[in-house]
Image (cartoon, helix red, strand yellow):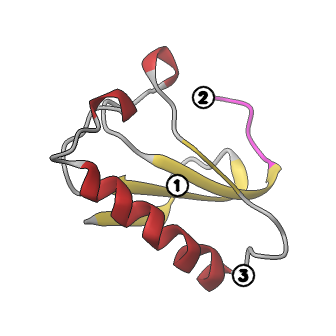
């Protein structure tokens, strides 16, 4: 249902992308029919956090939309640590 991988151009020290294996343009396109993909992502997030040892360090998860979204595919940024890049 999903792919999780290290961001190729990370903005934070520790930056993982989580992408559903279904073409969903953004959060506003989530529907009853495709919501299982988002559900599976949020079920996987605690496992990823535990595997990476981020429970104590703290972490954030975001999803961009509209003109803040550079890629027309729903995806989530799971990150921890300091900002390392201010470039888009």
Label 2 belongs to which residue? 88
Q: Tell me the magenta residue range.
A: 83-87
Counting from the top left corner in percent of width and height, residue 13 is at 74, 57
Q: Give the quadrant of residue 4.
A: bottom left
Residue 7: which disc? 1
Badge 2 vs badge 3, beta-carbon distance below 8 Å: no
Badge 1 vs badge 2, beta-carbon distance below 8 Å: no
Q: Nearer the viewer, residue 12 or 53?
A: 53
| Foreground disc of the pair 2, 3 | 3
The number of numbered badges drawn on the structure is: 3
Counting from the top left corner in percent of width and height, residue 41 is at 40, 62
Which type of secondary structure does the marked residue at label 2 adopt? loop
Other residues around mark 2 within 10 Å, as few (<14) / some (14–19) / many (≥20):
few
Counting from the top left corner in percent of width and height, residue 76 is at 49, 48
Counting from the top left corner in percent of width and height, residue 69 is at 46, 26
Return the residue found at the far front. 32
Badge 3 vs badge 1, beta-carbon distance below 8 Å: no
Question: Which badge, 1 or 2, is on the more N-terminal residue?
Answer: 1
Which residue: 67% across, 56% down? Answer: 79
Which type of secondary structure does the marked residue at label 1 adopt? loop
Question: Which badge, 2 or 3, is on the more N-terminal residue?
Answer: 3
Which type of secondary structure does the marked residue at label 3 adopt? loop
Question: Which badge, 3 or 1, is on the more N-terminal residue?
Answer: 1
Return the residue found at the far top. 67
| Foreground disc of the pair 3, 1 | 3
Give how far apart the Cα atoms at labels 1 and 2 are. Answer: 13 Å
């Amino acid at each position: 249902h999903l792919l999780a991988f290290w961001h190729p151009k990370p903005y934070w020290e520790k930056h993982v992308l989580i992408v559903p294996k279904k073409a969903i343009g953004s959060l506003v396109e989530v529907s009853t029919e495709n919501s299982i993909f988002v559900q599976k992502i949020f079920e996987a997030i605690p496992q990823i956090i535990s595997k990476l040892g981020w429970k104590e360090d703290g972490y954030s998860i975001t999803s961009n939309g509209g003109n803040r979204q550079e890629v027309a595919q729903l995806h989530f940024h799971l990150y921890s640590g300091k900002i390392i890049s201010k470039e888009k």
